[in-house]
Image (spheres, grey):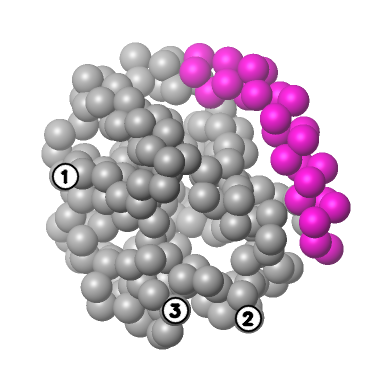
Amino acid sequence: MKRAFDLAVATALLCALGPVLLAVAAAVRVDSPGPILYRGRRTGRHGRPFDMLKFRTMVADAERLGGTTTGLDDPRVTRLGRVLRRYKLDELPQLINVVRGEMSLVGPRPEVEEYTRLYGDRERAILSVRPGITDYASLRFIDLASVVGAEDVDEVYRRSVLAQKNELRLKYVRESSFAVDLKILARTVQAMLSRGHGVRSTRI
């Protein structure tokens, strides 16, 4: 039922949001040189790697220039990218990942291999389900840049955030159900609307 729900909702949203997707794609193309889509290599279900899609919000080759974590007022983020990130519009192409079967609407947010290869037996349970566009960790760290700050952001992420995110990912794996998915989706929509009014965080 989860896969059927994911496929139906993702397909419907892609169709309904087609004009928005085209408009954002055109704006990204005009705003700065580089590809429209960012393809971030992530670890998927059962440890299989896949390319997570986003609208590009940073300068080309940003990860090579400054790592995988985006800090507060990160100079790599483009002018348009700041707007897309604030309202999470950069995440919309992940609906394509959902249709492909690489992701779900709700599931543990996919992580880079740099961190998943360090998972112990307990953390590997995270990889037993499809990663998702949103989950408990996405809600807790909806404004991750403010949490990691502007200095040594990759180190701050590893030291202060990664373990918390993994605990929330494991919480989802333990509690996973259709009702939980609907609750997380509803809270995600609520959080997006709250960000439009300047609210930076949400409770789990």
Amino acid tagged 2: Leu
Q: Is residue 22 magenta?
A: yes
Q: Residues within 10 Å of mark 1 (few under 14, many from 20)?
A: some
Q: Which residue is mark 1?
A: 171
Query: In the picture, residue 176 is in which quadrant?
Result: top left
Instruction: Give the percent coordinates (x, y) of residue 202.
Output: 27, 45
What quarter of the picture does the N terminus occupy?
top left
Q: Position of residue 190 (x, y in %)?
A: 35, 31
Amino acid identity at mark 1: Lys
Query: Could you tell me residue 118's position as x and y percent?
Result: 30, 71
Apparent side of residue 78 relative to residue 140 in the rendered image (left or right):
right
- Return the residue at label 2: 65
> For mark 3, does the 10 Å Cα neighbourhood hold few (<14), some (14 to 19), or many (20 or more) residues?
some
Look at mark 3 in the image and give the residue it sits on.
Answer: 150
- At horizontal 47% and vertical 40% (from top left) the residue drawn is 196
In-image side of 181 versus 83 (left or right): left
Is the magenta region chiefly helix, strand or loop?
Answer: helix
Amino acid at the residue labelled 3 = Ala
Q: Which residues are magenta?
A: 8-34
Whichever of callouts 3 and 2 sits on the residue coming sooner in the sequence is: 2
**Structural distance between the alpha carbons of marks 3 and 2:** 15 Å
Nearer mark to the viewer, of 3 and 2: 3
Asked if residue 29 shows in the view, the reply is yes
Ranked by sequence position, the earlier of labels 1 and 3 is 3
Callout 2: few (<14), some (14-19), or many (20+) C-alpha neighbours within 10 Å? few
Please say whether residue 2 is one of the residues in the magenta stretch.
Answer: no
User: Which element is circle 2 on?
Assistant: helix
Question: Which mark sits nearer the N-terminus, 1 or 2?
Answer: 2
Q: Nearer the viewer, residue 119 or 28?
A: 28
